[in-house]
C-alpha cells in the first residue's frame, strides 16, 4: 500500500519558520512530481508549491513566493517545504501530494486534480 507520511507541522510565531517533510513509499520515486497543498477552515484546498520529477522546475502560489522553498531528496524518498517568515494567513492543514504524471511546468502542478496520492495532513498554526 502506497503511503505518504508527513511530519514537521506545529505552532510557530509570526515571523518564525517551520519545515515540513513528506516521505513516500512509491517507486520509482524520482519519476514523481511532488507538491504541497493547504486548506484553512472554511476555505478550499489550494496549491502551495510543486517540484518536478527532475527537481529542475518549481512553482509557488503568489503569497508564499520568496518565503517558502520546496525541495526533494530522491535517496530518502522525501520532499520538504521550508517555510520562513510565517504569517497568520499561513495557518492551515498542509498536505503533501504526489503523482507520476504531475509536471510542475508551464503553470501546471498546483491543481489538486493533478495528484492522486495524498498525505494525511499536518497542522500548521501561526500565532501573531
Image (cartoon, grey):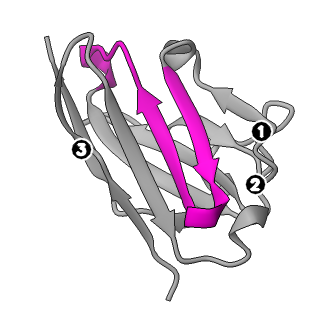
Are the two marked residues, 2 and 1, in contact with CB atoms closer than 8 angstroms? yes
Locate residue 43 relative to residue 48 in the image: left or right. left
First in sequence: mark 1 or mark 3?
1
Residue 63 pos. (x, y %) = 50, 14
44 in relation to 54, above or below: above
Eye-nearest disc, 1 or 3: 3
Q: The residue tagged with tag 1: helix, strand or loop? A: loop
Q: The residue tagged with tag 3: helix, strand or loop? A: strand
First in sequence: mark 3 or mark 2?
2
Q: Residue at x 60, y 41 (%)?
A: 71
Q: Residue at x 29, y 46 (%)?
A: 8
Range shown magenta: 68-90
Q: Nearer the viewer, residue 40 or 120?
A: 120
Count of all numbered marks drawn on residues in the image: 3
The quadrant where residue 32 appears? bottom right
Q: Dot 2, how many residues are within 10 Å of its Cα: few (below 14), some (14-19), or many (20+)? A: many
| Mark carried by residue 96 | none
Q: Is residue 110 visible?
A: no
Residue 34 pos. (x, y %) = 63, 52
The Cα atoms of the two marked residues, 3 and 2, are separated by: 24 Å
Residue at label 1?
108
Are the two marked residues, 3 and 2, in contact with CB atoms closer than 8 angstroms? no
Residue 112 pos. (x, y %) = 59, 49
Residue at label 3?
123
First in sequence: mark 2 or mark 1?
2
Q: The residue tagged with tag 2: helix, strand or loop? A: loop
| Mark carried by residue 102 | 2
Q: Is residue 81 magenta?
A: yes
25 in relation to 85, above or below: below
The Cα atoms of the two marked residues, 2 and 1, are separated by: 8 Å
Q: Residue at x 26, y 43 (%)?
A: 9
Amino acid at each position: 500500500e502506497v503511503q505518504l507520511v508527513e511530519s514537521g507541522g506545529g505552532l510557530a510565531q509570526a515571523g518564525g519558520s517551520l519545515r515540513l517533510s513528506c516521505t513516500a513509499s512509491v517507486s520509482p520515486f524520482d519519476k514523481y512530481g511532488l507538491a504541497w497543498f493547504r486548506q484553512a477552515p472554511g476555505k478550499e484546498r489550494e496549491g502551495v508549491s510543486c517540484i518536478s520529477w527532475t527537481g529542475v522546475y518549481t512553482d509557488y502560489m503568489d503569497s508564499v513566493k520568496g518565503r517558502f522553498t520546496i525541495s526533494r531528496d530522491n535517496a530518502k524518498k522525501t520532499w520538504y517545504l521550508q517555510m520562513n517568515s510565517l504569517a497568520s494567513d499561513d495557518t492551515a492543514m498542509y498536505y503533501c501530494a504526489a503523482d507520476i504524471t504531475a509536471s510542475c511546468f508551464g503553470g501546471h502542478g498546483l491543481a489538486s486534480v493533478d495528484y492522486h496520492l495524498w498525505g494525511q495532513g499536518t497542522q500548521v498554526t501561526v500565532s501573531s
